[in-house]
Image (spheres, rainbow, N blue to C red):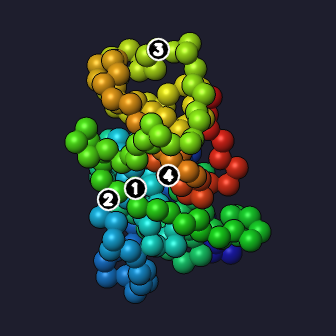
Amino acid sequence: DGWICPSVPCPGPAPTESNPIVIEIPISSPVQIMESTDCPNPCPWNYSGLQTKPGTNCKKFVNCVDGEVTDHFACYADNFFSDQSKGCLNIRDMGDGWICPSVPCPGPAPTESNPIVIEIPISSPVQIMESTDCPNPCPWNYSGLQTKPGTNCKKFVNCVDGEVTDHFACYADNFFSDQSKGCLNIRDMGDGWICPS
């Protein structure tokens, strides 16, 4: 008696990396999120996609294009940014005992004059057996840093137009990260990290 069907909006397409489910918090929102001011650009060098902002307990994230921030987003109430689903998820959907992972600031993009590397001196006792099957690990026409095959992510090269220009190495518990394009400590690589073959 007098019932009217409520207006129900169309939910739209399923979320994707380029079209995530996000809710922006306006500046006037009463939610206070203390974030690190030590990381002006949370985007890893040359990375495109969504990235958690360090120091926000997974409440804020950014869209990166070629290593630069293009948009800022936030999750509200009991929702947190999920790197796996690339959107805001309710804490109940994150799994038992979920804790926001520590997100390091990637630092400035490496350059030829300022690479993020530590070279191993020739007198170093570290022995790395590398593949002799790959004289040039640079993909055709590629410019950037590239893991050297057969070195368990301990060595990498700088490529310019598909040719090797420099050789670099990571020491001790540090390994070359293709995502951050520099040497990272094994503790910062994530649980169960294995050097890709």
**Residue 95 in sight from this viewpoint:** yes
Q: Residue at x 58, y 52 (%)?
A: 173
- Is the C terminus in the top left, top right, bottom left or bottom right quadrant? top right
- In the displayed orientation, state which residue is furthest to the bottom: 30
Q: Secondary structure at mark 4?
A: strand
Q: Mark 4 or mark 3: name the one nearer the start of the chain.
A: 3
Discs 2/4, front: 4
Q: On screen, 9 above or below 115?
A: below
Which of the two labelled residues, at mark 1 and mark 4, occupies the earlier sequence position? 1
Q: Residues within 10 Å of mark 1 (few under 14, many from 20)?
A: many
Q: Which residue has dot 3 on it?
A: 135
Task: Kindly identify the amino acid type of the residue bearing the numbered disc 3.
Answer: Pro
What is the three-letter code of the residue carrying label 2?
Asn
- Tell me the SS state at disc 3: loop
Query: Is 166 or 125 nearer to us in this picture?
Result: 125
How far apart are the alpha carbons under marks 2 and 3? 35 Å
